[in-house]
Amino acid sequence: MKELTSSPIAEGRTAEIYSWDDQHVLKLYRDWCPVDWVEYESQIARAVYGAGIPSPEPGEIVEVNGRRGLIYERIEGVSMLQDMNARLWMLLKHAHSLAELQVQINQKSITGLPSYKDRLRHDINNTPHLSPELREKAVNALASLPDGRNVCHGDYHPGNVILTKSGPVAIDWMAASFGSPWTDVARTNLLLSIGAKRAGRQVSPIIRAVISLYHRTYLKRYFALRPDKENESSRWTPVIAAARLSEDISAEREVLIKMVEAGLNA
């Protein structure tokens, strides 16, 4: 069992990223995470990579410092979000790239993924932040929406896209599932929208305008490549917002509830 002596090069709520060797990194789950998470992620990552989707190649599962983790191919580059912060003039190009890669992902259909609808239903039923009436409406709305067998990333946003010399690569596939591609678009649309709303007066009107332009350009490019003829992405929005409440992000709660109410009480 190997021990780590260096500091993580990146970290999130559930895991830390460490340099493993010149060609690989280690995603090391925090000690409170269930032990089966790493096996689940390995299964998903192998299915996604095997389908030819631009994503890091997964390696072996290891135990380090008493914690379990997954070795990944090292992807050289920076996130799209980091690059936009450093080079604002690349905003429109990056908005196009975000849409184009997502279309490429959503065109795939592979085995080994869970159902997006099942995950959403679980999240809606397990959030404490919905009234019984709104919860019932959200579950019924979910049941009425079309099914699909397309690959959905489940948490697709500029922070989960790495810009490399050979093109953008999507990372963090833990929430990947199969379903309607409009579910995935609605989730990205929600994340981009709520990010601007959460910022509110904390950022200048210029920055809010820039975020809005990026958001609109992304949607326009996606719809140009895959027309939303039945306006399905909008129909998914209140359902996605209801499920997002289960993540218990207090700064988003009020905005999300208003989105659910507006979408389901109309």
Image: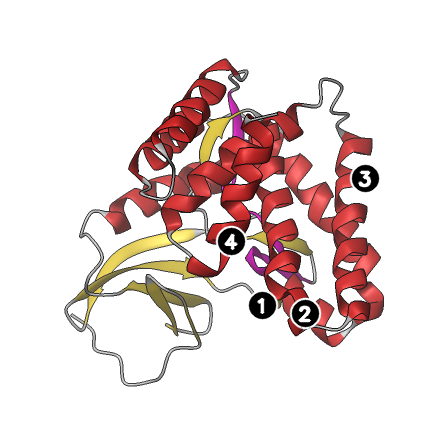
Mark 2 nearby-residue class (10 Å; few <14, some 14–19, many ≥20) = few
Circles 2 and 4 in contact, beta carbons < 8 Å: no
Residue at (20, 47) in percent of width and height: 36
Residue that numbered label 3 is attached to: 220
The disc, 1 or 2, on the residue closer to the chain's N-terminal end is 1
- Numbered mark located on residue 210 in the image: none
Q: Label 4 crowding class (10 Å Cα cut-off): few <14, some 14-19, many 20+?
A: some
Viewer-nearest of discs 4 and 1:
4
The residue labelled by disc 4 is 171
* Disc 4 and disc 1 in contact, CB within 8 angstroms: no
Q: Which residue is mark 1?
A: 76
Mark 2 lies on residue: 201
Real-space CA distance between mark 2 and mark 4, rounded to the nearest whole angstrom: 31 Å
Measuring from the top left, give residue 78's x and y in whole percent.
Answer: 62, 69
**Which residues fall within the magenta stretch?**
149-164
Going by the numbered disc 1, the residue's amino acid type is Glu
Compared to residue 231, the image places residue 103 above or below, namely below
Q: Residue at x 52, y 36 (%)?
A: 260
- Asked whether disc 2 touches disc 3, contact meaning CB atoms under 8 Å apart, the reply is no
Q: Earlier in the sequence, mark 1 or mark 3?
A: 1
Give the left or right position of residue 123, taking residue 204 as reference: left
The N terminus - image quarter: bottom left
Label 4 to label 1: alpha-carbon separation = 12 Å
Gap between marks 1 and 3 measured at Cα = 29 Å
Residue 120 visible to the viewer: yes
Q: Earlier in the sequence, mark 4 or mark 1?
A: 1
Amino acid type, label 3: Lys
